[in-house]
Image (cartoon, grey):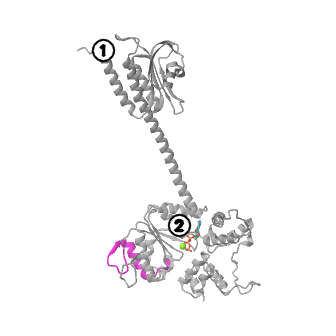
Amino acid sequence: MQVPFELRRKLLQLEALYDIGRALSSLRPEGDLLEELMQRAISVLDATIGFAVSLDSESQLQHLYALGLAEGESVERVMATEPVKRVLAMRTPLSTTVVDFLGETGGAVLVAPLLAGDALLGAVGVVGKEERGPVSGSFVDDDLRFLASLATIGAAAIDNSRNFARLNRMRESLESENRSLRERMLREFSNRLMIGDSPEMQRVIDLVARVADSHANVLIRGESGTGKEMIARLVHGNSPRREKPFIALNCAALPETLLESELFGIERGVATGVEARPGKFELAQGGTVFLDEIGDIPMTLQAKLLRVLQEREIEKLGGRKKIKVDVRILAATHRPLEAMIEKGEFRQDLYYRLRVVEIVLPPLRARRQDIPKLVRYFLDKYGTREGRTDIRLAPEALEKILGYPFPGNVRELENLIEGAVALAVDPVIGAADLHLPDAKGGGGIEGFGENFPTLKELELRYVAKVLTETRGNMSQASRILGVDRKTVYRWRDALSQNRSFDEFSDIN
Ligand SMILES: Nc1ncnc2c1ncn2[C@@H]1O[C@H](COP(=O)(O)OP(=O)(O)OP(=O)(O)O)[C@@H](O)[C@H]1O
Ligand SMILES: [Mg+2]
Protein backbone atom coordinates (compact mmCIF):
# COMPACT_ATOMS: atom_id res chain seq x y z
CA MET A 1 0.00 0.00 0.00
CA GLN A 2 1.24 3.41 -0.88
CA VAL A 3 1.45 5.63 2.21
CA PRO A 4 0.62 9.15 1.21
CA PHE A 5 3.61 11.45 1.25
CA GLU A 6 2.01 13.84 3.74
CA LEU A 7 1.42 11.03 6.21
CA ARG A 8 4.96 9.75 5.87
CA ARG A 9 6.30 13.18 6.65
CA LYS A 10 4.12 13.40 9.78
CA LEU A 11 5.24 9.97 10.92
CA LEU A 12 8.85 10.90 10.42
CA GLN A 13 8.44 14.03 12.51
CA LEU A 14 6.70 12.17 15.30
CA GLU A 15 9.39 9.55 15.35
CA ALA A 16 12.03 12.24 15.44
CA LEU A 17 10.33 13.93 18.40
CA TYR A 18 10.08 10.62 20.16
CA ASP A 19 13.73 9.83 19.50
CA ILE A 20 15.00 13.16 20.55
CA GLY A 21 12.86 13.13 23.66
CA ARG A 22 14.56 9.94 24.64
CA ALA A 23 18.02 11.04 23.59
CA LEU A 24 17.78 14.33 25.43
CA SER A 25 16.39 12.92 28.62
CA SER A 26 19.70 11.25 29.34
CA LEU A 27 21.94 13.66 31.19
CA ARG A 28 24.48 15.00 28.75
CA PRO A 29 26.59 18.11 28.47
CA GLU A 30 24.73 21.13 27.18
CA GLY A 31 26.87 21.38 24.02
CA ASP A 32 26.05 17.80 23.04
CA LEU A 33 22.36 18.42 23.54
CA LEU A 34 22.40 21.49 21.33
CA GLU A 35 24.30 19.79 18.57
CA GLU A 36 21.91 16.87 18.59
CA LEU A 37 18.97 19.25 18.47
CA MET A 38 20.39 21.00 15.42
CA GLN A 39 21.16 17.72 13.62
CA ARG A 40 17.62 16.45 14.12
CA ALA A 41 16.10 19.68 12.90
CA ILE A 42 18.20 19.61 9.75
CA SER A 43 17.52 15.98 8.92
CA VAL A 44 13.79 15.94 9.60
CA LEU A 45 13.12 19.26 7.88
CA ASP A 46 15.53 18.64 4.96
CA ALA A 47 17.22 22.00 5.57
CA THR A 48 20.44 23.19 3.95
CA ILE A 49 21.52 25.24 6.97
CA GLY A 50 20.86 24.57 10.66
CA PHE A 51 21.92 26.24 13.88
CA ALA A 52 21.37 26.10 17.62
CA VAL A 53 22.48 28.58 20.29
CA SER A 54 22.28 28.65 24.05
CA LEU A 55 22.45 31.64 26.40
CA ASP A 56 23.08 31.87 30.10
CA SER A 57 20.81 33.66 32.57
CA GLU A 58 22.53 36.97 31.70
CA SER A 59 21.81 36.38 27.97
CA GLN A 60 25.49 35.75 27.33
CA LEU A 61 26.31 33.28 24.58
CA GLN A 62 27.12 29.82 25.92
CA HIS A 63 27.21 27.49 22.93
CA LEU A 64 26.67 28.00 19.25
CA TYR A 65 26.54 25.36 16.54
CA ALA A 66 25.83 25.84 12.85
CA LEU A 67 25.98 23.53 9.85
CA GLY A 68 25.90 24.35 6.14
CA LEU A 69 27.29 27.89 6.39
CA ALA A 70 29.42 29.26 3.55
CA GLU A 71 33.08 28.33 3.63
CA GLY A 72 35.02 30.64 5.98
CA GLU A 73 31.86 32.14 7.46
CA SER A 74 32.11 32.63 11.21
CA VAL A 75 29.56 30.81 13.29
CA GLU A 76 29.19 33.74 15.70
CA ARG A 77 27.54 35.82 13.01
CA VAL A 78 24.43 33.65 13.25
CA MET A 79 23.54 35.73 16.32
CA ALA A 80 23.55 38.87 14.23
CA THR A 81 21.02 37.64 11.65
CA GLU A 82 17.61 39.28 11.62
CA PRO A 83 15.48 36.13 12.21
CA VAL A 84 17.58 35.03 15.24
CA LYS A 85 17.56 38.52 16.76
CA ARG A 86 13.81 38.71 16.32
CA VAL A 87 13.09 35.34 17.91
CA LEU A 88 15.33 36.07 20.87
CA ALA A 89 13.53 39.38 21.34
CA MET A 90 9.96 38.14 20.79
CA ARG A 91 10.38 34.68 22.31
CA THR A 92 7.93 33.18 19.77
CA PRO A 93 8.54 30.82 16.81
CA LEU A 94 9.09 32.56 13.49
CA SER A 95 8.61 31.51 9.87
CA THR A 96 9.98 33.90 7.29
CA THR A 97 12.11 34.11 4.15
CA VAL A 98 15.46 35.76 3.53
CA VAL A 99 17.25 36.42 0.27
CA ASP A 100 20.63 35.77 1.74
CA PHE A 101 21.81 33.97 4.89
CA LEU A 102 25.40 34.88 5.77
CA GLY A 103 26.47 34.80 2.17
CA GLU A 104 24.54 31.66 1.25
CA THR A 105 21.45 31.69 -0.85
CA GLY A 106 18.59 32.22 1.58
CA GLY A 107 15.06 30.99 1.29
CA ALA A 108 12.57 29.85 3.89
CA VAL A 109 13.70 30.29 7.52
CA LEU A 110 12.24 28.69 10.65
CA VAL A 111 13.46 29.69 14.13
CA ALA A 112 12.06 28.58 17.50
CA PRO A 113 13.07 29.86 20.93
CA LEU A 114 14.35 27.47 23.62
CA LEU A 115 12.10 28.31 26.55
CA ALA A 116 12.09 26.64 29.94
CA GLY A 117 9.37 28.26 31.96
CA ASP A 118 10.09 31.99 31.83
CA ALA A 119 13.72 31.52 31.00
CA LEU A 120 15.04 32.00 27.50
CA LEU A 121 17.80 29.46 27.02
CA GLY A 122 18.52 30.01 23.32
CA ALA A 123 17.12 29.23 19.89
CA VAL A 124 17.18 26.60 17.19
CA GLY A 125 16.62 27.25 13.49
CA VAL A 126 16.83 25.99 9.92
CA VAL A 127 17.25 27.74 6.56
CA GLY A 128 16.57 26.67 2.98
CA LYS A 129 14.44 23.64 2.35
CA GLU A 130 16.15 21.03 0.19
CA GLU A 131 14.09 20.33 -2.91
CA ARG A 132 12.60 16.89 -2.48
CA GLY A 133 9.17 15.40 -3.11
CA PRO A 134 6.18 17.30 -4.41
CA VAL A 135 6.47 20.15 -1.92
CA SER A 136 9.74 21.90 -2.54
CA GLY A 137 11.68 24.97 -1.57
CA SER A 138 9.53 26.09 1.31
CA PHE A 139 8.54 24.79 4.71
CA VAL A 140 4.94 24.12 5.58
CA ASP A 141 3.07 25.19 8.72
CA ASP A 142 3.57 21.79 10.27
CA ASP A 143 7.32 22.22 10.00
CA LEU A 144 7.26 25.21 12.32
CA ARG A 145 5.08 23.32 14.78
CA PHE A 146 7.58 20.47 14.65
CA LEU A 147 10.55 22.79 15.24
CA ALA A 148 8.74 24.48 18.15
CA SER A 149 8.07 21.07 19.73
CA LEU A 150 11.66 20.06 19.22
CA ALA A 151 12.74 23.32 20.88
CA THR A 152 10.46 22.71 23.87
CA ILE A 153 11.90 19.26 24.47
CA GLY A 154 15.42 20.56 23.92
CA ALA A 155 14.94 23.45 26.34
CA ALA A 156 13.65 21.12 29.04
CA ALA A 157 16.69 18.90 28.54
CA ILE A 158 19.11 21.82 28.72
CA ASP A 159 17.35 23.16 31.79
CA ASN A 160 17.66 19.74 33.38
CA SER A 161 21.30 19.45 32.54
CA ARG A 162 21.99 22.93 33.94
CA ASN A 163 20.12 22.17 37.16
CA PHE A 164 21.97 18.93 37.48
CA ALA A 165 25.31 20.62 36.93
CA ARG A 166 24.41 23.30 39.44
CA LEU A 167 23.35 20.77 42.05
CA ASN A 168 26.47 18.80 41.36
CA ARG A 169 28.67 21.84 41.85
CA MET A 170 26.78 22.66 45.02
CA ARG A 171 27.16 19.12 46.29
CA GLU A 172 30.86 19.11 45.48
CA SER A 173 31.47 22.39 47.23
CA LEU A 174 29.41 21.28 50.23
CA GLU A 175 31.30 18.02 50.35
CA SER A 176 34.66 19.68 50.20
CA GLU A 177 33.57 22.24 52.77
CA ASN A 178 32.38 19.43 54.99
CA ARG A 179 35.61 17.53 54.55
CA SER A 180 37.80 20.49 55.36
CA LEU A 181 35.63 21.39 58.35
CA ARG A 182 35.94 17.87 59.68
CA GLU A 183 39.69 17.86 59.20
CA ARG A 184 40.03 21.27 60.79
CA MET A 185 37.91 20.21 63.72
CA LEU A 186 39.98 17.12 64.32
CA ARG A 187 43.20 19.11 64.03
CA GLU A 188 41.94 21.85 66.30
CA PHE A 189 40.46 19.31 68.63
CA SER A 190 43.72 17.47 69.14
CA ASN A 191 45.65 20.74 69.05
CA ARG A 192 43.45 22.20 71.68
CA LEU A 193 43.63 19.08 73.73
CA MET A 194 47.25 18.14 73.39
CA ILE A 195 50.20 20.40 72.89
CA GLY A 196 53.21 18.34 72.00
CA ASP A 197 55.58 18.78 69.09
CA SER A 198 58.39 16.92 70.82
CA PRO A 199 59.22 13.48 69.42
CA GLU A 200 58.22 12.00 72.79
CA MET A 201 54.71 13.45 72.56
CA GLN A 202 54.40 12.75 68.85
CA ARG A 203 54.97 9.09 69.65
CA VAL A 204 52.21 9.26 72.24
CA ILE A 205 49.79 10.96 69.84
CA ASP A 206 50.60 8.39 67.14
CA LEU A 207 49.85 5.61 69.56
CA VAL A 208 46.55 7.26 70.51
CA ALA A 209 45.59 7.48 66.86
CA ARG A 210 46.38 3.81 66.30
CA VAL A 211 44.66 2.48 69.39
CA ALA A 212 41.60 4.76 69.40
CA ASP A 213 39.69 2.77 66.77
CA SER A 214 40.10 -0.56 68.53
CA HIS A 215 38.24 -2.01 71.46
CA ALA A 216 41.45 -2.59 73.44
CA ASN A 217 41.67 -1.52 77.06
CA VAL A 218 44.39 1.06 77.55
CA LEU A 219 46.51 1.74 80.60
CA ILE A 220 47.80 5.30 80.68
CA ARG A 221 50.82 5.93 82.86
CA GLY A 222 52.82 8.96 83.80
CA GLU A 223 53.65 11.26 86.66
CA SER A 224 51.07 13.50 88.19
CA GLY A 225 49.94 16.29 85.87
CA THR A 226 51.40 14.86 82.68
CA GLY A 227 48.03 14.78 80.93
CA LYS A 228 46.77 11.24 81.55
CA GLU A 229 43.14 12.27 81.69
CA MET A 230 43.57 14.32 78.52
CA ILE A 231 44.90 11.27 76.73
CA ALA A 232 41.95 9.22 77.95
CA ARG A 233 39.55 11.82 76.54
CA LEU A 234 41.49 11.93 73.29
CA VAL A 235 41.28 8.15 72.91
CA HIS A 236 37.54 8.21 73.52
CA GLY A 237 37.00 11.25 71.31
CA ASN A 238 38.69 9.57 68.37
CA SER A 239 37.07 6.18 68.85
CA PRO A 240 33.89 4.82 67.28
CA ARG A 241 32.34 5.32 70.74
CA ARG A 242 32.75 9.09 70.67
CA GLU A 243 29.00 9.75 70.47
CA LYS A 244 28.46 7.64 73.58
CA PRO A 245 29.33 8.69 77.13
CA PHE A 246 32.81 9.08 78.59
CA ILE A 247 32.47 8.40 82.30
CA ALA A 248 35.42 9.08 84.59
CA LEU A 249 35.83 7.84 88.13
CA ASN A 250 38.71 8.63 90.48
CA CYS A 251 39.37 5.41 92.36
CA ALA A 252 41.50 7.18 94.96
CA ALA A 253 38.99 9.78 95.98
CA LEU A 254 36.35 7.55 97.58
CA PRO A 255 36.21 5.09 100.46
CA GLU A 256 35.78 1.48 99.41
CA THR A 257 32.02 1.03 99.88
CA LEU A 258 31.21 4.26 98.09
CA LEU A 259 33.58 3.38 95.29
CA GLU A 260 31.87 0.05 94.85
CA SER A 261 28.41 1.56 94.55
CA GLU A 262 29.76 4.24 92.21
CA LEU A 263 31.19 1.55 89.95
CA PHE A 264 28.39 -0.96 89.93
CA GLY A 265 25.31 0.93 91.12
CA ILE A 266 22.77 0.17 93.82
CA GLU A 267 19.48 -1.70 93.63
CA ARG A 268 16.54 -0.14 95.41
CA GLY A 269 15.97 -1.38 98.94
CA VAL A 270 19.56 -2.18 99.89
CA ALA A 271 19.06 -0.06 102.94
CA THR A 272 16.32 2.29 103.97
CA GLY A 273 16.87 5.75 102.67
CA VAL A 274 19.15 4.59 99.88
CA GLU A 275 17.92 5.49 96.42
CA ALA A 276 18.50 3.06 93.59
CA ARG A 277 21.32 4.39 91.45
CA PRO A 278 23.03 3.30 88.27
CA GLY A 279 26.77 2.69 88.42
CA LYS A 280 29.40 4.19 86.15
CA PHE A 281 29.51 1.06 84.01
CA GLU A 282 25.80 1.31 83.32
CA LEU A 283 25.99 5.04 82.66
CA ALA A 284 28.78 4.50 80.18
CA GLN A 285 26.82 1.84 78.25
CA GLY A 286 28.21 1.75 74.71
CA GLY A 287 30.91 4.24 75.65
CA THR A 288 34.05 4.45 77.75
CA VAL A 289 34.75 4.18 81.47
CA PHE A 290 37.89 5.97 82.64
CA LEU A 291 39.23 4.55 85.90
CA ASP A 292 41.61 7.19 87.16
CA GLU A 293 44.19 6.34 89.84
CA ILE A 294 43.53 2.65 89.31
CA GLY A 295 46.58 1.89 91.46
CA ASP A 296 44.60 3.06 94.48
CA ILE A 297 41.68 0.66 94.10
CA PRO A 298 41.33 -1.67 97.13
CA MET A 299 42.06 -5.40 96.69
CA THR A 300 38.44 -6.53 97.21
CA LEU A 301 37.25 -4.24 94.46
CA GLN A 302 40.08 -5.37 92.21
CA ALA A 303 38.54 -8.85 92.26
CA LYS A 304 35.09 -7.51 91.45
CA LEU A 305 36.43 -5.32 88.69
CA LEU A 306 38.28 -8.25 87.16
CA ARG A 307 35.05 -10.22 87.06
CA VAL A 308 33.32 -7.40 85.18
CA LEU A 309 36.14 -7.24 82.67
CA GLN A 310 36.01 -10.99 82.11
CA GLU A 311 32.27 -11.48 81.96
CA ARG A 312 31.25 -8.07 80.64
CA GLU A 313 28.34 -7.94 83.03
CA ILE A 314 27.76 -6.27 86.34
CA GLU A 315 25.77 -7.01 89.44
CA LYS A 316 24.45 -4.04 91.35
CA LEU A 317 24.84 -3.77 95.10
CA GLY A 318 21.89 -5.70 96.51
CA GLY A 319 20.84 -6.69 93.04
CA ARG A 320 19.86 -10.15 91.99
CA LYS A 321 20.19 -10.00 88.26
CA LYS A 322 23.22 -9.38 86.11
CA ILE A 323 23.30 -6.56 83.59
CA LYS A 324 25.23 -6.82 80.34
CA VAL A 325 27.57 -3.92 79.80
CA ASP A 326 29.39 -2.88 76.66
CA VAL A 327 32.12 -0.51 77.74
CA ARG A 328 35.70 0.13 76.92
CA ILE A 329 38.01 0.56 79.88
CA LEU A 330 40.71 3.18 80.02
CA ALA A 331 42.69 3.31 83.24
CA ALA A 332 45.38 5.65 84.51
CA THR A 333 47.89 5.65 87.30
CA HIS A 334 51.18 7.19 88.37
CA ARG A 335 51.85 4.24 90.68
CA PRO A 336 54.46 1.55 90.06
CA LEU A 337 51.98 -1.28 89.48
CA GLU A 338 54.70 -3.88 88.85
CA ALA A 339 56.26 -3.23 92.25
CA MET A 340 52.80 -3.29 93.81
CA ILE A 341 52.16 -6.70 92.23
CA GLU A 342 55.42 -7.93 93.80
CA LYS A 343 54.23 -6.72 97.17
CA GLY A 344 50.81 -8.27 96.67
CA GLU A 345 49.06 -4.88 96.52
CA PHE A 346 47.80 -5.20 92.97
CA ARG A 347 46.40 -8.22 91.17
CA GLN A 348 48.50 -9.38 88.27
CA ASP A 349 45.52 -10.77 86.31
CA LEU A 350 43.76 -7.41 86.54
CA TYR A 351 46.97 -5.69 85.49
CA TYR A 352 47.14 -7.73 82.28
CA ARG A 353 43.48 -7.13 81.52
CA LEU A 354 43.84 -3.39 81.87
CA ARG A 355 47.19 -3.10 80.16
CA VAL A 356 46.31 -4.50 76.72
CA VAL A 357 47.92 -1.36 75.37
CA GLU A 358 50.07 0.90 77.49
CA ILE A 359 50.62 4.59 76.86
CA VAL A 360 53.39 6.18 78.90
CA LEU A 361 53.41 9.95 79.21
CA PRO A 362 56.88 11.44 79.53
CA PRO A 363 57.37 13.99 82.32
CA LEU A 364 57.57 17.59 81.20
CA ARG A 365 61.27 17.87 82.13
CA ALA A 366 61.99 15.14 79.57
CA ARG A 367 60.42 17.17 76.77
CA ARG A 368 61.37 20.77 77.44
CA GLN A 369 60.95 21.58 73.81
CA ASP A 370 57.16 21.54 74.38
CA ILE A 371 57.37 24.18 77.11
CA PRO A 372 57.34 27.38 74.99
CA LYS A 373 54.25 26.28 73.10
CA LEU A 374 52.51 25.19 76.28
CA VAL A 375 53.33 28.55 77.82
CA ARG A 376 51.88 30.36 74.82
CA TYR A 377 48.83 28.13 74.92
CA PHE A 378 48.15 28.80 78.61
CA LEU A 379 48.89 32.52 78.24
CA ASP A 380 46.31 32.58 75.50
CA LYS A 381 43.81 30.51 77.47
CA TYR A 382 44.00 32.55 80.68
CA GLY A 383 44.64 35.83 78.89
CA THR A 384 41.38 35.34 77.03
CA ARG A 385 39.57 34.36 80.21
CA GLU A 386 40.81 37.44 82.06
CA GLY A 387 40.16 39.68 79.06
CA ARG A 388 43.91 40.36 78.73
CA THR A 389 44.83 39.18 75.27
CA ASP A 390 47.87 41.50 75.17
CA ILE A 391 49.70 39.54 77.83
CA ARG A 392 53.20 38.24 77.05
CA LEU A 393 56.19 36.70 78.76
CA ALA A 394 59.56 38.47 78.97
CA PRO A 395 62.42 36.39 77.55
CA GLU A 396 64.03 36.09 81.01
CA ALA A 397 60.77 34.76 82.37
CA LEU A 398 60.71 32.03 79.74
CA GLU A 399 64.36 31.28 80.57
CA LYS A 400 63.44 30.88 84.21
CA ILE A 401 60.60 28.51 83.30
CA LEU A 402 62.83 26.46 81.03
CA GLY A 403 65.33 26.04 83.89
CA TYR A 404 62.75 24.73 86.35
CA PRO A 405 62.22 20.95 86.68
CA PHE A 406 58.40 21.03 87.03
CA PRO A 407 57.82 18.10 89.36
CA GLY A 408 54.10 18.80 88.94
CA ASN A 409 54.47 18.65 85.16
CA VAL A 410 51.98 20.33 82.82
CA ARG A 411 49.50 20.99 85.58
CA GLU A 412 52.13 22.88 87.55
CA LEU A 413 53.09 24.89 84.49
CA GLU A 414 49.45 25.64 83.82
CA ASN A 415 48.87 26.83 87.39
CA LEU A 416 52.00 28.94 87.24
CA ILE A 417 50.85 30.75 84.10
CA GLU A 418 47.29 31.07 85.34
CA GLY A 419 48.55 32.69 88.53
CA ALA A 420 50.93 35.00 86.70
CA VAL A 421 48.18 36.17 84.33
CA ALA A 422 45.76 36.76 87.19
CA LEU A 423 48.29 38.88 89.09
CA ALA A 424 49.89 40.66 86.15
CA VAL A 425 49.76 44.45 86.23
CA ASP A 426 51.94 44.90 83.17
CA PRO A 427 51.13 43.15 79.90
CA VAL A 428 54.66 41.72 80.03
CA ILE A 429 55.24 39.11 82.71
CA GLY A 430 58.79 39.33 84.04
CA ALA A 431 60.92 36.67 85.70
CA ALA A 432 60.23 38.19 89.11
CA ASP A 433 56.48 37.76 88.61
CA LEU A 434 56.85 34.01 88.40
CA HIS A 435 56.68 32.41 91.81
CA LEU A 436 58.53 29.19 91.33
CA PRO A 437 59.39 27.11 94.39
CA ASP A 438 63.04 27.22 95.32
CA ALA A 439 64.58 24.24 93.61
CA LYS A 440 67.08 23.85 96.47
CA GLY A 441 64.43 22.98 99.02
CA GLY A 442 64.53 25.42 101.92
CA GLY A 443 61.08 26.18 103.27
CA GLY A 444 62.36 26.90 106.75
CA ILE A 445 60.72 29.17 109.24
CA GLU A 446 63.25 31.96 108.57
CA GLY A 447 63.05 34.35 105.68
CA PHE A 448 59.54 35.73 106.03
CA GLY A 449 60.90 39.21 106.55
CA GLU A 450 58.07 41.40 107.75
CA ASN A 451 55.44 39.38 105.88
CA PHE A 452 54.34 36.79 108.38
CA PRO A 453 51.87 34.39 106.82
CA THR A 454 48.88 33.15 108.82
CA LEU A 455 49.05 29.62 110.11
CA LYS A 456 46.52 28.57 107.47
CA GLU A 457 48.63 30.04 104.68
CA LEU A 458 51.69 28.35 106.02
CA GLU A 459 49.84 25.04 106.16
CA LEU A 460 48.73 25.49 102.61
CA ARG A 461 52.23 26.22 101.44
CA TYR A 462 53.54 23.27 103.36
CA VAL A 463 51.00 20.91 101.75
CA ALA A 464 51.93 22.26 98.33
CA LYS A 465 55.59 21.80 99.12
CA VAL A 466 55.15 18.21 100.24
CA LEU A 467 53.07 17.42 97.17
CA THR A 468 55.74 18.89 94.95
CA GLU A 469 58.53 17.01 96.66
CA THR A 470 56.72 13.67 96.62
CA ARG A 471 55.91 14.16 92.93
CA GLY A 472 52.34 13.12 93.31
CA ASN A 473 53.01 9.98 95.32
CA MET A 474 49.94 10.23 97.49
CA SER A 475 50.88 7.48 99.91
CA GLN A 476 54.21 9.14 100.62
CA ALA A 477 52.56 12.56 100.93
CA SER A 478 49.95 11.19 103.30
CA ARG A 479 52.69 9.59 105.43
CA ILE A 480 54.65 12.82 105.64
CA LEU A 481 51.59 14.94 106.37
CA GLY A 482 50.11 12.43 108.76
CA VAL A 483 46.63 12.42 107.20
CA ASP A 484 44.88 9.79 105.11
CA ARG A 485 45.28 9.61 101.36
CA LYS A 486 41.78 10.82 100.59
CA THR A 487 42.43 14.04 102.45
CA VAL A 488 45.63 14.53 100.49
CA TYR A 489 43.67 14.08 97.27
CA ARG A 490 41.10 16.63 98.31
CA TRP A 491 43.79 19.13 99.17
CA ARG A 492 45.67 18.51 95.99
CA ASP A 493 42.57 18.99 93.85
CA ALA A 494 41.70 22.19 95.69
CA LEU A 495 45.27 23.40 95.29
CA SER A 496 45.41 22.58 91.61
CA GLN A 497 42.14 24.39 91.02
CA ASN A 498 43.32 27.43 92.99
CA ARG A 499 40.34 27.24 95.24
CA SER A 500 40.15 29.42 98.31
CA PHE A 501 41.93 28.73 101.56
CA ASP A 502 38.59 27.93 103.19
CA GLU A 503 38.82 24.55 101.56
CA PHE A 504 41.61 23.88 104.02
CA SER A 505 39.62 24.61 107.07
CA ASP A 506 39.95 20.96 107.97
CA ILE A 507 43.69 21.30 108.34
CA ASN A 508 43.86 21.39 112.06
N1 LIG B 1 49.89 18.27 76.27
C1 LIG B 1 49.07 19.11 76.91
N2 LIG B 1 48.60 20.18 76.26
C2 LIG B 1 47.79 21.05 76.90
N3 LIG B 1 47.39 20.92 78.16
C3 LIG B 1 47.83 19.87 78.85
C4 LIG B 1 48.68 18.91 78.26
N4 LIG B 1 48.96 17.96 79.18
C5 LIG B 1 48.31 18.32 80.28
N5 LIG B 1 47.61 19.46 80.11
C6 LIG B 1 46.81 20.17 81.13
O1 LIG B 1 47.41 19.90 82.37
C7 LIG B 1 46.43 19.61 83.36
C8 LIG B 1 46.71 18.23 83.91
O2 LIG B 1 46.36 17.25 82.95
P1 LIG B 1 45.63 15.89 83.37
O3 LIG B 1 44.60 16.17 84.40
O4 LIG B 1 45.22 15.21 82.15
O5 LIG B 1 46.88 15.16 84.03
P2 LIG B 1 46.92 13.80 84.85
O6 LIG B 1 48.10 13.08 84.35
O7 LIG B 1 45.61 13.14 84.79
O8 LIG B 1 47.24 14.33 86.29
P3 LIG B 1 47.02 13.55 87.71
O9 LIG B 1 47.89 12.39 87.71
O10 LIG B 1 47.45 14.60 88.68
O11 LIG B 1 45.58 13.23 87.77
C9 LIG B 1 45.10 19.73 82.70
O12 LIG B 1 44.55 21.00 83.01
C10 LIG B 1 45.40 19.63 81.24
O13 LIG B 1 44.50 20.46 80.55
MG1 LIG C 1 44.30 12.75 86.40
Vertical arrangement, residue 457 with respect to residue 34, above or below = below
The magenta stretch spans residue 404: no
Please report the residue visible at 67 percent of the width from the left and 71 percent of the height from the top.
422
Mark 2, Cα crowd under 10 Å, few <14 / some 14-19 / many 20+, is many
Please report the residue visible at 70 percent of the width from the left and 82 percent of the height from the top.
442
Between 320 and 333, the one lying in front of the other is 320
Query: In 3D space, how far apart are the residues under numbered discs 1 and 2 (Cα atoms)?
Result: 86 Å
Q: Which residues are magenta?
A: 295-323
Between 475 and 450, the one lying in front of the other is 450
Q: Which residue is mark 1?
A: 5
**Three-letter code, disc 1:** Phe
In screen coordinates, is 403 left or right of 489?
A: right
SS state under label 2: helix
The magenta stretch spans residue 303: yes
Q: Nearer the viewer, mark 1 or mark 2?
A: 1
* Quarter of the rendered image showing ligand 1: bottom right
SS state under label 1: helix
Vertical arrangement, residue 347 with respect to residue 392, above or below = below
- Is label 2's Cβ within 8 Å of ligand 1? yes
Which quadrant of the rendered structure holds the N terminus? top left
Figure disc tally: 2
